[in-house]
Amino acid sequence: MDEYQFFYEAGCRICGSREIEKAFWRCFRYLRNHIPADSLSLHLFDSGLGIIETVVDVQAERGVLLSVKTQLPPTARKRISAFIEGLGGKPQCQIINRLSQDKMVRPVARDMGSLDDPGLILDLIVEGEYLGTLAVTNARGETYTEEHARMLLLLHDPFALAAANFLEYTVVRKLKDRLADDYRQLGADLMHLKGDAVVGAEQGLKGVMNLVRQVAPTHSPVLLLGETGVGKEVIAQTIHQLSPRRDLPLIKVDCAAIPESLMESELFGHEKGAFTGAVSKVRGRFERAHGGTLFLDEIGELSLEAQKRILRVLQDRVIERVGGSGTIPVDIRIIAATHRPLETMVEGREFRKDLLFRLNVFPLSIPPLRERREDIPLLVDFFIKKKSRELGLPFFARLAPGAIDTLKGYPWPGNIRELENCVERELIIKGKEPLNFSSLLPMEPVLTEIPAEQLNGGSLSLDRAISTHIRKVLDMTEGRVEGNRGAARLLDVHPRTLQHRMKKLNILFGRNYKKKQRAKAKGSLES
């Protein structure tokens, strides 16, 4: 065999398409003429998260992109780390007669359904950084030879560069999506405030706003207390807008939405090369809020370990990026918010007492909507105008006689957020007709739609109904969101839209969903 011709033909196919799955498929079709192969797959190793993610799977018919994440146990992570260190930056191609016999590749082979197959495992290394492996297997049981391994090793550089470029592209795409989300969030934030005006500031929220004006000019921490949906984020924005830090960033951290494994990177940032996929330096939320305000929303949802890390930053006023060696000073004002009873959580050892002391300098309780019903007419007027613009309606809807009485008579367990959703739903249903909010009147079908055991304290809020329906669909798809068998397809919404809604509703999906199901199954077995 002419090695140069082999390298040229295979290399041209690997570099012949910007779509990695198509490029690998073209190479696979050529490669199988020289090496026994029924499949080719790309597996990336993330040492920080301790996972191996299968991102490309090539069969005879086609190549596909996917994301199959295999969580490695501690022993497997140590074994792989020792193996990588032993390579010394030089790739090799292993021959494995049966994938189930190798402890390092067995977990991935199990997820890929190829435990009984022989395989060639090519390590991919770029500039001393270990990216992962390329696996070539066959289901015929045909044994690989040293010559096969040598031929595949010839193609290390084009395969490794393709994998590195794929990682770069993935990071850029995530940053682009994050920027788009930040832009949309900024637009949503600007919709909440008009200068220093807050709806109800001179009525039901008058006492709260008096306290806001007192504390805003200071640099003291503020703890916002109140039920879900009462408008804690709006009050936090108002405090920032009235403070000397108004011209500097207000950065929000949704403590309930950040997975524990990503907490350090999200909050404190990371250096280039800190872990697989960290191709550039990234500033965390604390660093981005330097000079401004950091809003820790739902701080009661933080784990004890995360509370410890945040307390350390609040005490020392310095952070250290993941993978960094030096400290970075930060000057931030903290505004925290929660709907949970932190003092009770302290007694139950679910929340650190020393962190509560740091945050509870100026507690501010926001009353629920049912205790300030005089604000409902102003809020309805505000939401009608806001939602009419968002829906592109060429008119502002009118209220039917008695509509305000109906709204004032409803208990609003979901508070202002439920009222906003209710107005949007009514605008969609009624069109040009006057809004009467008849759906809020007691009706038997409404009471029987959702089983009583699924209600949260008897709540029939729109958020609760949506959350219940999404959870049912996720159970049908086993936590999968994207793809033909994903929840987004069944619900007929864009996957990113569904993921954004699930994060707001604190619904687990994907890997976190499966982790919860495994824990639930383990608990039932133990009982």
Image (spheres, helix red, strand yellow):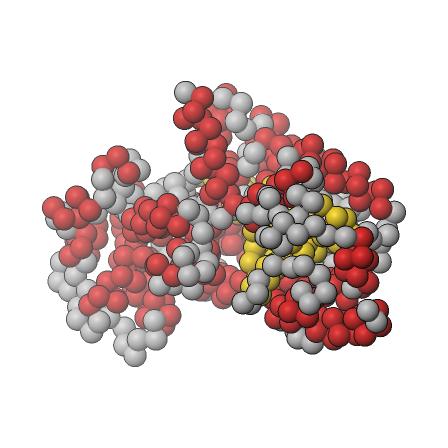
Percent of width and height locating residue 20: 64, 67
Quarter the C terminus occupies: top left
Percent of width and height locating residue 241: 55, 57
The residue at 38%/61% (across/down) is 489
The residue at 72%/65% (across/down) is 34
Q: Residue furthest bottom?
A: 394
Q: Is residue 395 left or right of residue 122?
A: left
The residue at 77%/66% (across/down) is 158
Percent of width and height locating residue 341: 44, 31
Q: Is residue 202 left or right of residue 72?
A: left
Residue 399 visible in rendering: no
**Tally of marks:** 0
Quarter where residue 164 is shown: bottom right
The residue at 59%/43% (across/down) is 115
For the residue pair 247 and 16, the one nearer the viewer reads as: 16
Quarter the N terminus occupies: bottom right
Quarter where residue 5 is shown: bottom right
Is 346 located above or below residue 100 in the figure?
Answer: above
